[in-house]
Amino acid sequence: MHILVNDIAASKTGALSILQDFYQYVRQEESGHEWIFLLSGDYLEETDKIRIRVIKDVKKGWLHRLYFDFFSFGKLIREYRPDVFFSMQNTLPRKCGCRQVLYVHQPLGFQKTKRFSLFKKSEREYAIYQHLISRLIDRSIVRADKTIVQTAWMRDAVIKKTHVDAGKVVSILPDIKDLSSYRDSLAISPNMFFFPSGNILYKNHKLLYLAAEILLGRGISDFVIRVTLTEEELRSNIGNAKPEVLARFDCMGRIERENVYEQYTKSVLLFPSYIETFGYPPAEARAVGSLVLASDCPFCREVLAGYENAYYFDPFDAKALAELMEDVMTGKIRHEKPVSPVNGRQNSWEQVVNVLTENDNT
């Protein structure tokens, strides 16, 4: 089978990580098919069974993207004549004359927690995705032969919004590295909190600041909140910050994944994010066996379902988070030795390949 994979949008952070993970699976495990990856940069290596086509101009702007979708894409389809076209970037170009599978990992148009405004500068980029680009995603889902999403809540939201047949939408949980070895070194400090995240508005760092401010107002100061932002990035989320509150934060900047896993063994995970397709930190912290304070949102409830060390708060209520943090520090909430199964690897990319090739009669 000839499978054409399109991910020209991937160039950084999460999208690029997803692309690289899928590529590594195909390279190491998949030998029965021929693969062509369409990319915007030299991110991957060719092999005997994997061809790479770099199309650099597409990332210059929306006009270049539209030109690719309506003109260049047709030439590539005629050149490669794939049996399956797999788009990993939330949208499909025009009809390609073969089976089309779509991978959707952009939740902004499907969540109901926050409505972003085009008139607020800090929200404009998110509003464009939520109100405009989401329409392209919806149309792509309707046209796709199969759509893959990461979670059950996302599957339900996609079906409800687009009215596609339920059989055309598949939920496949992402792989989580086996972190069970870290359980042997669990030593959670009730005064140490940790939030690994990039500098994105809906990750909700400001809530952590407000909760810290409330705790200081109650005379509670013996705690540290570690974040993977620089101090400048943290300040950009807060505005006029009080020095005494900022002093409770340890701005670690970007850290290696191994360091993240180690932090889970000695810190309480804070996860105030209110928009995710799938929350990796809660899933990883659960796999390690850590204590988790998470936003009361569908993705957290799904990832942490049945986990005995999970507690939830309203992501827009700093007082609710502060009270949970105080309960941890005073011992009202205690970290228990996990007894639930480790939420480890699900062989998700194998499941994705099965969806791509399910009509293969060769």
Image (cartoon, rainbow, N blue to C red):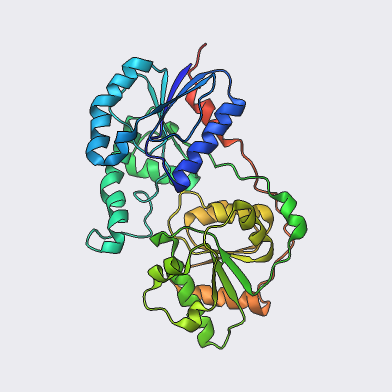
Could you say which is closer to the camera, residue 169 or residue 14? 14
As drawn, the residue found furthest toward the top would be 362
Pinpoint residue 240: horizontal percent, then vertical percent. 37, 78
Residue that appears at 66% across and 80% down? 330
- Answer whether residue 306 is visible to the viewer in this image: no
Instruction: Please tell me whether residue 232 is drawn above or below residue 34 in the rendered image.
Output: below
Pinpoint residue 360: horizontal percent, then vertical percent: 50, 16
Q: Which residue is more in the foreground, 340 or 221?
A: 221
Residue 167 at x, y percent in the picture: 44, 31
Residue sitting nearer the eye, 228 or 134? 228
Compared to residue 14, the image places residue 170 above or below, namely above
Task: Report x, y in % for residue 280.
Answer: 55, 51
Residue found 53% across the figure and 76% down from its top: 322
Horizontal side of residue 49 vs 330, given as left or right: left
30 lies above or below 331: above
Horizontal side, residue 46 vs residue 67: left or right: right
